[in-house]
Amino acid sequence: MFLSLLENPMTTKAKIVDLGQLTRLTDQWKSDDLKVVFTNGCFDLLHPGHIDYLEKSSLLGDRLIVAVNANVSVKMLKGAERPIFDEQDRAKMIAALHFVDAVILFEENTPEAIVERVLPSVLVKGADYKISNIAGAEIVMRNGGKVELIELKPGFSTSSIIGKLKGLNG
């Protein structure tokens, strides 16, 4: 275990990359014949459901990229009271997970432009999605990749956790 940590000295901060850095990383991984997995989300309040989902995503390949919605994107999707944590804090929490290899922030409603640029081998979303509604799915499949749906851990969602917390305070 200790030796494997020494083999990958990438710090949490170094895992948070921009699109140019991500493209260079994915090009290198692909040239090394590594299977690149991509997923995305707000990850507004990191919880056991997120950990389970991301860990299962990582098992579908050799390298896991997680695109995290920037603050402006979270507000558009979830409302004015969100996000709970700032985009840099959310990115850092995701990057701290040992099975995550790269994190990128995006401001758009979907990460489709990033997916198109990196062309992952596997695109992952929760099983609450339909493949036809997943941003970038068509691009990935057209380029020989696949789209995987992962069952979500029951009882965990950021919205329900926030609701519970509001109930305790109200």
Image: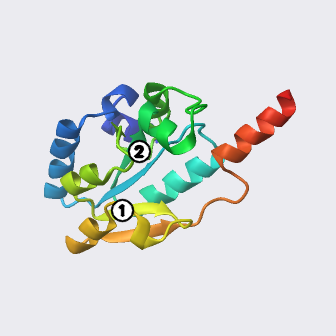
Q: Secondary structure at mark 2?
A: loop
Crowdedness near tag 1: few (<14), some (14–19) or many (≥20) residues, C-alpha within 10 Å: many
Q: Quick check: 62 above or below 102?
A: below
Identified at 56% across, 65% down, the residue is 128
Q: Earlier in the sequence, mark 1 or mark 2?
A: 2
Residue that label 2 marks: 100
Q: Secondary structure at mark 1?
A: strand
Q: Quick check: 96 above or below 55?
A: above
Identified at 30% across, 54% down, the residue is 112
Confirm whether residue 9 shows in the render: no
| Left or right, 85 with reference to 7 | right
Identified at 28% across, 61% down, the residue is 35
Crowdedness near tag 2: few (<14), some (14–19) or many (≥20) residues, C-alpha within 10 Å: many
Of residue 14 and residue 19, the one placed in the foreground of this image is 19
| Left or right, 90 with reference to 145 | right
Q: How is the image coloured?
A: rainbow
Confirm whether residue 116 shows in the render: yes
Of residue 85 and residue 49, the one placed in the foreground of this image is 85
Quarter of the image with the C terminus in it: top right
